[in-house]
Amino acid sequence: MEIRGIHVLGAFVGAFSIIIGVNLVLATQAVRTFSGVEVKNSYVASQEFDIRRAAQEALGWDVAVTLEGDELILAITDEAGAPVTPERISAIFGKATSVAWDQSPDFAFDGQVHRAVVDGGPGNWNLRMTALADNGTEFRQRVIVDVR
C-alpha cells in the first residue's frame, strides 16, 4: 500500500485532534475544581494578616521541634527562655510532599516541652501548628523537621 498525501493529512489531523481534546478536558476540569479566588478582598486580607502577624510577634515565642524515635518534641519558649504552656495546641505533622502521611499529634506538657507519639522516620517533615495564648492570640507556625 502506498502512503499518499490524504493518509498523512488524516494522521496529522487525528493526532492533533487527540492533543487538543485532552487539553480541553484538562482545562475544563482545572477551572471547575478551582476558580482561582482565595479571598474576596485581598487588601482586607493583607491588613488582617499584618495585624495577626504583629500580635503573634508581640508574644515573643520561639518554637523548636525535634523527632526522637517515635516521639515528637515541641519546645515553645518565651523571650526569657521559659517554657510556654498555651491554652490549646492543634497541629498537623506530615511529609512535606504528601498529605497521605498527615497526623494530628496529641501533645502532653511534661513541665518543659510538649511531647506526642507519632509515626515518623527519616525524611523531610513539617509541623503546621496553631497555639492559643492566654490573651487569646493565635500563634501559627510551620516548622520544618529534617530527620536523618
Image: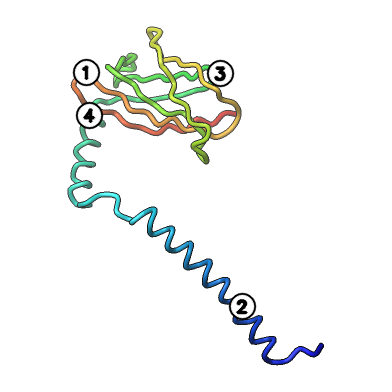
Q: Mark 1 points at which residue?
A: 134
- The label number, if any, that marks residue 70 in the structure image: 3
Percent position of residue 81, x then y: 34, 17
Question: Could you tell whether 72 is left or right of 32 in the image?
Answer: right
Q: Which of marks 1 and 3 is nearer the N terminus?
A: 3
Q: Mark 2 points at which residue?
A: 14
Is 38 located above or below residue 70 in the figure?
below
Percent position of residue 124, x then y: 54, 34
Tag 1 near tag 4, CB within 8 Å: no
- Residue sitting at x 47%, y 68%: 24
Percent position of residue 50, x then y: 22, 41
Is 110 located above or below residue 29 in the figure?
above
Closer to the eye: label 3 or 4: 3
Q: In which quarter of the image is residue 135?
A: top left
Q: Give the amino acid at mark 4.
A: Ala
The quadrant the N terminus occupies is bottom right
Label 4 residue SS: helix
Closer to the eye: label 1 or 4: 1
Tag 4 near tag 2, CB within 8 Å: no
Tag 3 near tag 4, CB within 8 Å: no
- The label number, if any, that marks residue 58 in the structure image: 4
Label 3 residue SS: loop
Q: Which of marks 4 and 2 is nearer the N terminus?
A: 2
Q: Which of marks 1 and 2 is nearer the N terminus?
A: 2
Tag 1 near tag 2, CB within 8 Å: no
